[in-house]
Amino acid sequence: MGLQEKSKTSRPLYKSFMFAFQGIKGVVKSERNMKIHLAAACAVLFFGWYFSVSRLEWLFLLVAISGTITLEMVNSAIERTVDLITGDIHPLAKQAKDIAAGAVLVYAVFSVLTGLIIFLPRLFGIMYYVISPLLR
Ligand SMILES: Nc1ncnc2c1ncn2[C@@H]1O[C@H](COP(=O)(O)OP(=O)(O)OP(=O)(O)O)[C@@H](O)[C@H]1O
C-alpha cells in the first residue's frame, strides 16, 4: 500500500506526532537559522526567568518565540517544496522563497522589538545600578 492509499484514520495518533517530531528534528539539524532562533529563545527564557517578568510579558515572549520558530519551519517547508517542484531558475520560485523568507524576517523584527520593550528598561536598570557608584 502506497503512502497516499493508506487511510489517515487507520494511522495511530502517536505516529502522526512522530512524523511531526521528525520534521522538527530535521529542520533543527539542517537549518542554521533555526539554530540561531533556538539559541535566542533560550536566552529570552533565561532572561525572562532572571528578571521575573510578568504573566503578560511571558505571554508576549512565548508568542514571539513560538511564532518565529513556527514561521521558520513553514519557510523551510516552502523552500523544499519549491526545490522539489523545480530545479530550474524561475522567477516564481524566487518569489515564493523570498516572500516566505520575508515573512520570517517581519516576525523576527516583531520578536526583537518585543524583547527590547520588555528587557531594555531592566537592562538599563542594571546598568544604572552598576555605573552610579562609579560616578559618585
Ligand atoms: N529555483 C530558483 N529560481 C530562482 N531563484 C531561486 C531559486 N532557488 C532559490 N532562488 C533564490 O536564490 C536565493 C538563495 O536561495 P537559497 O534557497 O539558496 O537560500 P535562502 O533563500 O537564502 O535560504 P536559506 O539560507 O534558508 O537556505 C534566494 O533569493 C532565492 O529566492
Image: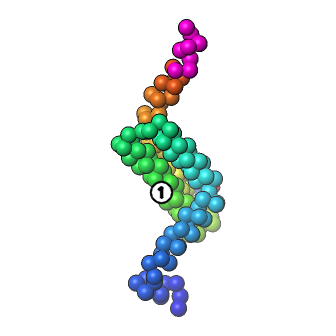
23 relative to 132, above or below? below
Give the quadrant of residue 89. bottom right
13 relative to 32, above or below? below
Towards the viewer: 43 or 129: 129
- What residue sits 52% from the left and 25% below the top? 126
Q: Is residue 14 magenta?
A: no
Q: Is residue 131 magenta?
A: yes
Give the quadrant of residue 121. top left
What type is the residue that disc 1 sits on?
Thr
Quadrant for ligand 1?
A: bottom right
Horizontal and vertical percent position of residue 112: 48, 39
Towards the viewer: 47 or 37: 47
- What residue sits 57% from the left and 69% below the top? 22
Side (left or right) of 47 relative to 28: left
Horizontal and vertical percent position of residue 71: 48, 55
- Viewer can see residue 92: no
Some atom of ligand 1 lies within 8 Å of the CB belonging to the residue at label 1 = no
Magenta part of the protein: which range? Answer: 129-136
| Chief SS of the magenta region | helix
Towards the viewer: 41 or 45: 45
Q: Residues within 10 Å of mark 1 (few under 14, many from 20)?
A: some
